[in-house]
Image (spheres, rainbow, N blue to C red):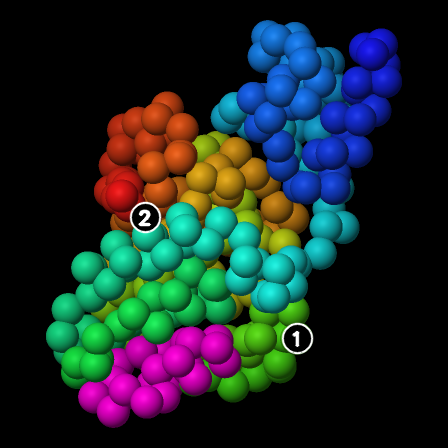
Amino acid sequence: MLAEERYKKIISLVNEKGSIRVAELSQMFQVTEETIRRDLGKLEASGKLIRSHGGAVSVDTTQPEIPYAKREITNVEEKQKIAAEVIHRINENDRIFLDASTTAWYAASSLPNVPLTVVTNSIKAAIELSDKDKIEVICIGGKLSQQSLSFIGPLAEQSLEQYYVDKAFISSKGVHMARGLSDANEQQAKLKQKIIDLADHVYLMADYSKFGVQAFTKICSLPSIRGVITDSNTDGSVLRELSDSGIDVIVAK
C-alpha cells in the first residue's frame, strides 16, 4: 500500500472512531509502529488529526454523542471493574453524584442497600436504585436526552445547584493530558462543570479507550479532579503522568 493511500485510510478511521492507537494501526497496515508515528506526525502537521499519547484523535468537531445502547455493550468488563472500585470509595451516609454514563449505571446496580443520598441525572441509574429503600434518590429534571437517557439543559443545571455532595463520580468522552476532560455533548459538559463546583471530591471514571482523546466540548482541566479510576489496560506512562500531577490513580483489577 502506498503511503498516500495509508494516510487517507488513517484519516477515515480516526474520524470514524474518534480516536485510534498506534499499535492498532501498525497491526492493521502491517507496518512498524515507528512508521505509523511518522504518518501521524505528517497528518498532524497538515491539520488532519491531533496526535495523542499512543495514538491520534479526530479533529472532526461534528462527532455525535454515542447512543446509550451502544455504550452499554462497549468495554463492559473494564467498566464493571471500574464500577467495583467506585463502590469501594462510597461510605454509609455519603452524599454522592452519579452521572449518566454506563459505568455509573454499573455502579448504581452494585451499590449495597445502605443509608446514602444519590443525586443523578440518569434515568437508568435512578431506576436501578429505586428498589433500595435505604438509599435516598434525587433525580434532577430537565430536558430528556434520548441519546444518553438522562436529563440535561438549563433546568437540570438549576436543579443541581440546590445540592452539595461529598463525592461526584463522572465520566468523559476524552481525557487529554494537556487539554483536560472533554465531552461530545455541550449540555452534558455544562452539567458536569456544575457538579465539579458543588462536590467536595470529584472522581473520573475512564477506561483505557478515553485517554489521549479530545472531544468537542471542554469539561475541565485535570487539576479539577481528585482521582482517576481506570482499568489495567491504560498505558503506564499515562498513569505515571497523572500521578506526577498530584491526581490519585486507582487501577481496577
Would you say residue 197 is visible in this rendering?
A: no
Q: Whole-percent x and y of residue 245?
A: 30, 33
Is 97 located above or below residue 228 in the figure?
A: below
Q: Is residue 63 magenta?
A: no
Kind of residue at disc 2: Ile
Label 2, secondary structure: give it: strand
Read off the residue under disc 2: 229
- Residue range in magenta is 117-138
Which residue corresponds to the image point at 68% horizontal and 41% vertical from the top-left? 17
Which residue corresponds to the image point at 21% horizontal and 75% vertical from the top-left? 112
Query: Of label 1 and label 2, which has the lower sequence position?
Result: 1
Q: Whole-percent x and y of residue 203?
A: 32, 54
Q: Which mark is residue 146?
A: 1
Q: Nearer the viewer, residue 127 or 205?
A: 127
The image quadrant where one finds the C terminus is: top left
Alpha-carbon neighbours of circle 1 within 10 Å: few (<14), some, or many (≥20)?
few
Q: In this image, 123 relative to 34: left or right?
A: left
Alpha-carbon neighbours of circle 2 within 10 Å: few (<14), some, or many (≥20)?
many
Which residue corresponds to the image point at 40% horizontal and 34% vertical from the top-left? 234
Kind of residue at disc 1: Gln
Which residue corresponds to the image point at 85% horizontal and 10% vertical from the top-left? 2
- Location of residue 113 by image quarter: bottom left
Q: Is residue 132 magenta?
A: yes
Q: Whole-percent x and y of residue 10?
A: 75, 26
The image quadrant where one finds the N terminus is: top right
Q: Nearer the viewer, residue 208 or 180?
A: 208
- Location of residue 250 by image quarter: top left
